């Protein structure tokens, strides 16, 4: 299965942190398509199904793309209430952790309904940090069955840590790992996982390349892993930004290009909540980065 080199992350169109309208979300997906983006990632977690519904509607009638969604959080009926996990939505559903065989199959069936599709290309076990054994013994075999049945083409794991994915790579037959925020200009801790994936032929989707915001602008500000950035991290990010400027490169441009240099990484997945953000990212992605920059950044790290 061939993975496109650039992907669209669907959390922002699930109203991550702030609401976007249906029209804004559709415009973002349309801009990604026009820019040649052909991988789209979503999850039930993103806006309690809102991202899946919006993405499915925007992709309806289109062909030639790779679509991934996730399992591990099922959505069950609940009294309407504002979401308390970072998404600006009010929904009559709540999340329930479920990595059982039945839960995985039901979760994917429900995702297909929201997406308006008969199948997806990739299904990822989502954030099993506190459910590792059940994810290994039940969720993974369930996805392997679905892969054998042709309901999905590839299966894997999506997390913002590298240790558990490394165990899955060693003990199972995954096709792909989505690693968020652990192989970036500021955090290279996930390198052992990427090396293991390269050795085993497991493809890596690099997400969270801006570390939630600190690397997203030329003048580093904001959050690191969704928390206020420390003074030490701010200083490091500013030093990296200065090095980029010396080579005629912007900080977000370098942040996007960095993970793609590893042989295991096949796709860089970028979240965006507007057409303007999508177009900016696509333009920066297309610009070359001089090799001399990487040597200087290696010294800074």
Image: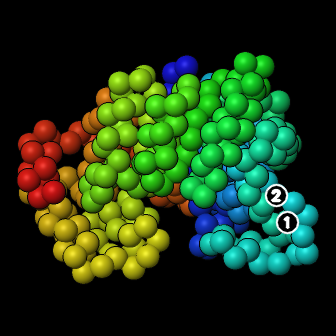
Nearer the observer, 299 or 96: 96
Nearer the observer, 20 or 139: 139
- Disc nearer the start of the sequence (1/2): 2
Nearer the observer, 229 or 40: 229
* Residue 61 in sight here: no
Q: Are marks 1 and 2 in contact (CB under 8 Å)?
A: yes
Q: At x 19% / y 68%, what residue is drawn?
A: 236
Q: Position of residue 138 (x, y in %)?
A: 72, 38
Residue matched to label 2: 75
Residue 106, by quadrant, is: top right
Horizontal arrangement in the rendering, residue 289 relative to residue 119 (left or right): left
Q: Position of residue 19 (x, y in %)?
A: 66, 71
Q: Position of residue 151 (x, y in %)?
A: 77, 26
Residue 185 tag number: none
Q: At x 64% / y 53%, what residue is drawn?
A: 131
Horizontal arrangement in the rendering, residue 147 relative to residue 196 (left or right): right
Quadrant containing the N terminus is top right
Residue 67, by quadrant, is: top right
Using a 10 Å C-alpha cutoff, classify the residue at mark 1 as few (fewer than 14 neighbours), some (14 to 19) or many (20 or more).
some
Residue matched to label 1: 93
Q: Is residue 93 above or below residue 117?
A: below
Residue 155, by quadrant, is: top right
């Amino acid at each position: 299965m061939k993975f496109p080199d650039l992907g669209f992350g669907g959390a922002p169109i699930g109203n991550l942190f702030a609401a976007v309208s249906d029209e804004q979300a559709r415009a973002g997906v349309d801009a990604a398509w026009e820019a040649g983006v052909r991988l789209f990632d979503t999850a039930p977690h993103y806006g309690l199904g809102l991202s899946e519904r919006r993405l499915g509607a925007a992709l309806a009638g289109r062909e030639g793309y790779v679509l991934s969604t996730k399992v591990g959080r099922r959505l069950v009926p609940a009294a309407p209430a504002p979401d308390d996990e970072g998404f600006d939505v009010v929904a009559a559903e709540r999340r329930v952790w479920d990595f059982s065989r039945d839960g995985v199959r039901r979760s994917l069936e429900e995702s297909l309904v929201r997406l308006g599709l008969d199948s997806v290309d990739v299904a990822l076990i989502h954030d099993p940090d506190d459910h590792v054994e059940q994810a290994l013994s039940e969720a993974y075999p369930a996805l392997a069955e679905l892969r054998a049945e042709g309901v999905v083409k590839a299966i894997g794991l999506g997390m913002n840590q590298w240790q558990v994915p490394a165990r899955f790579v060693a003990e199972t037959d995954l096709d792909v790992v989505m690693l968020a925020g652990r192989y970036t200009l500021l955090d290279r801790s996930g390198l052992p996982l990427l090396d293991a994936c390269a050795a085993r032929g497991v493809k890596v989707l690099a997400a969270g390349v801006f570390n939630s915001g600190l690397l997203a602008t030329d003048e580093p500000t904001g959050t690191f892993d969704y928390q206020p950035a420390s003074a030490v991290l701010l200083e490091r990010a500013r030093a990296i930004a200065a090095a980029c400027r010396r080579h005629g490169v912007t900080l977000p441009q370098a942040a996007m290009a960095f993970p793609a240099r590893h042989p295991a990484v096949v796709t860089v997945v970028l979240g965006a909540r507007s057409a303007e953000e999508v177009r900016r990212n696509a333009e920066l992605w297309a610009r070359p980065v001089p090799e001399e920059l990487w040597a200087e950044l290696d010294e800074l790290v």
